[in-house]
Amino acid sequence: MAADRLYDKPLFMISIAAELSAMHPQTLRMYERRGLLRPRRSAHNTRLYSQQDVERLQRIQELTEVGLNLAGVERVLQLEEQMAELHAEMERMHAQLARAAERLRDEVREAERAQRHELVAVRTMAIVPFRRRGR
């Protein structure tokens, strides 16, 4: 859990984030203006970047290196975020389904236990039609 908090915590000033992502600080400012990146601000209005921001910068760089323009990069990032949200929703629904299935199994076991005492053994017999013989 502590690692998750550090992943999202704004730790790096723009010069460090630029160095970690192998970009010029002006590029980071431009990405922020385009809305591709949203660094947090300190009390003195200094941009602060998290490890998550640095990884996003690296992803942007990967996408531009394969030939996408910034509009394409923005669309890919949106689709990746949607996919991550859908995956998380699917995981939540899977867990909910598993809980419901377990409750259903418990209810079936309880119903079987309750009915076990109510069942009475019945012998089956063959029914043969009866014909009277003439007198």
Image (cartoon, helix red, strand yellow):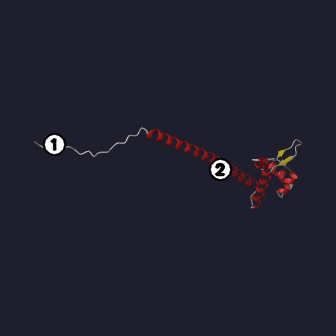
Q: Residues within 10 Å of mark 2 (few under 14, many from 20)?
A: few
- Name the spot of residue 85 as percent of width and height, x first: 67, 48
Task: Name the residue type under label 1.
Answer: Arg
Tag 1–tag 2 contact (CB < 8 Å): no
- Name the spot of residue 8 as percent of width and height, x first: 78, 48
The answer to whether 120 appears left or right of 1 in the picture is: left
In this orientation, does residue 92 appear?
Answer: yes
Q: Nearer the viewer, residue 133 or 99?
A: 133
Task: Name the residue type under label 2.
Answer: His
Q: Nearer the viewer, residue 74 or 60?
A: 60
Residue position for label 2:
87
Residue occupying the point 44% across, 39% down:
115
In this orientation, does residue 37 appear?
Answer: no
Q: Mark 1 or mark 2: which comes first in sequence?
A: 2
Residue occupying the point 74% across, 54% down:
73
Q: Which mark is residue 17?
A: none
The answer to whether 15 appears left or right of 59 in the picture is: right
Pick out the residue farthest to the right: 44
Q: Nearer the viewer, mark 1 or mark 2?
A: 1
Residue position for label 1:
132
- Quarter the C terminus occupies: top left
Image label count = 2
Residue occupying the point 60% across, 47% down:
94
- Name the spot of residue 23 as percent of width and height, x first: 84, 57
Instruction: Identify the secondary structure beneath mark 2.
Output: helix
